[in-house]
Amino acid sequence: MLTLRTSRTRALTSGVGLPLAALTALATVTACGDQKASGAMTVGGAPIAGVHWTVQSVTVDGHTTKSPGGAYVEFVSDERVRGNYGCNHFDARAEVTDDSVDLGKAKRTMMLCEGKGVSAFEDTLARALAEKNTVKAAAGDQGLVLTRANGDTVTLAKQRDAKLVGTKWNVTSLSADGTTGSLPKAAQGRARLVFEKDGHISARLGCNSGRAKATVQGDHITFGPLTSTRMGCIGAAGEVEKTMLDVLKNKVSYDIQGNTLTLKQPDGSDSGIGLTAADG
């Protein structure tokens, strides 16, 4: 049994990226609908809809573990909750009322996650959220605390979506043929996009660097021809660059959730890239 109460903790806005494993196949999460939650949805009088709730920490048996970054919870609708355990994503059916939230069994991606404590934190958080939990809330404005009947807690903080323009977006995952994988270790930190105020993007592609026009309309971005350096690229960096060039060659759909950005080709090919806002 899990009880939720709101707190007045300050929202974290950390965009710390997670250490990522070699490119691995990832089981695709089955979506339960893409509708956004109504902004009027509340629990105990606290608005919870349309908010990116960053996981700050999990306390189990009196021991508190801080989140390594990247973990979040979103109330998509009164029938669906989605989020990230710190590396892998989850999607769960839920029943949200004005004073409770019942979380059902979650569908979970199967990405191999590197980094000290990341896998252990994922398992701890997943267990805390896995069972059917009744959640209640009291008045508050910045944070939520989920408390189980045995005293275990999950602390959440409200986080605003990062801005598309001006943010340094580090590439952290690649999608192709219906599967998603994290960047190969050798390519981590070598791919990045920055959307500039003048309507262009500057790009680090994994090996080469380039610049292109980027026109944003609604939830789509149309890229012009990319002008880039012409170094020969091999290995992991070359593979990352090839995928990025395929995605950025024309029109993509984009979605920002907290400090994460997803770019996908709108032609049903499932090719895309995932990015995380850098600190500072």
Image (spheres, helix red, strand yellow):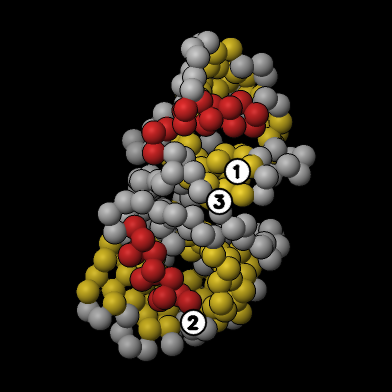
Residue farthest left in this picture: 63
The amino acid type of the residue labelled 3 equals Ala
Q: How many labels sit on residues?
A: 3
Q: Disc 2, disc 3: CB below 8 Å?
A: no
- Secondary element at image label 3: loop
Relative to 173, 272 lies left or right: right
Between 188 and 36, the residue placed more toward the observer is 188
Question: Can the viewer see residue 168?
Answer: no
Circle 3 is placed at which residue position?
A: 25
Please identify, in this view, whether the residue under mark 2 or under mark 3 is nearer the observer.
3
Instruction: Return the mark for residue 131.
Output: 2
The amino acid type of the residue labelled 1 equals Ser
* Horizontal and vertical percent position of residue 132: 52, 83
* Horizontal and vertical percent position of residue 187: 42, 32
Circle 1 is placed at which residue position?
A: 175
Residue farthest right in this picture: 267
- The N terminus lies in quadrant: bottom left
Q: Which class describes the residues within 10 Å of circle 3: few (<14), some (14-19), or many (20+)?
A: some
- Secondary element at image label 2: loop
Relative to 68, 48 lies left or right: right
Question: Can the viewer see residue 211?
Answer: yes
Q: Which class describes the residues within 10 Å of circle 2: few (<14), some (14-19), or many (20+)?
A: some
Residue at the image point whose x is 28% and y is 74% from the top: 59
* Horizontal and vertical percent position of residue 250: 71, 26
In space, the residues marked 1 and 2 are separated at their CA atoms by: 30 Å
Check the image and report above or below for 69 versus 133.
above
Please identify, in this view, whether the residue under mark 1 or under mark 2 is nearer the observer.
1
Which of the 4 image quadrants contains residue 256? Answer: top right
